[in-house]
Image (cartoon, grey):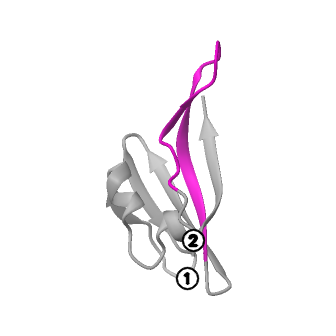
Amino acid sequence: MSRIIPISEIKIEKNPILTLYAVVVHVSNHYTCYIKCGKNWFYYNDVSSDMKYIGTYEDMLNAGVTNPQTHGVLYFYKV
């Protein structure tokens, strides 16, 4: 399986910095999502009733089965 490391910030010449704020993950025909709120990352799975606290960007990158580096399908950035 290929590994993609989403960059936490992207700087495009003469434009504002884009910051990663969400990653959609696909595992076993089910989609889930990592969401950045403030400086912290959370994990949302519609099968459970609450969001799970993940922590830092590095913690999010090293998450278990739903690792965004190996199962990420959409990466969202904002200004």
Q: Position of residue 55 (x, y in %)?
A: 31, 55
Image vertical order of residue 12 relative to residue 69, above or below: above
Image vertical order of residue 14 relative to residue 79, above or below: above
Image vertical order of residue 74 relative to residue 67, above or below: above
**Left or right side of 24 for 43:** left
The residue labelled by disc 2 is 71
The residue labelled by disc 1 is 47
Q: Amino acid at mark 2?
A: His
Residue 47, image quadrant: bottom right
Q: Residue furthest bottom?
A: 28
Is 12 part of what is drawn in magenta? yes
Q: Amino acid at mark 1?
A: Val
Q: Residue furthest front?
A: 2
Alpha-carbon span between mark 1 and mark 2? 18 Å
Is 10 part of what is drawn in magenta? yes
**Which numbered disc, 1 or 2, marks the residue closer to the eye?**
2
| Label tally | 2
Q: Measuring 32% from the left and 50% from the top, which residue is drawn there?
A: 56
Q: Position of residue 75 (x, y in %)?
A: 62, 52
Q: Earlier in the sequence, mark 1 or mark 2?
A: 1
Dot label at residue 60: none
Badge 1 crowding class, 10 Å Cα cut-off, few under 14, some 14 to 19, many 20 or more, is: few
Q: Position of residue 52 (x, y in %)?
A: 39, 67
Q: Measuring 46% from the left and 70% from the top, which residue is drawn there?
A: 67
Per the image, label 1 sits on a secondary structure element best described as: loop
Q: Residue furthest top?
A: 14
Per the image, label 2 sits on a secondary structure element best described as: helix
Q: Which residues are magenta?
A: 5-26
Q: Measuring 35% from the left and 62% from the top, which residue is drawn there?
A: 53
Looking at the image, which is closer to me, 47 or 19?
Answer: 19
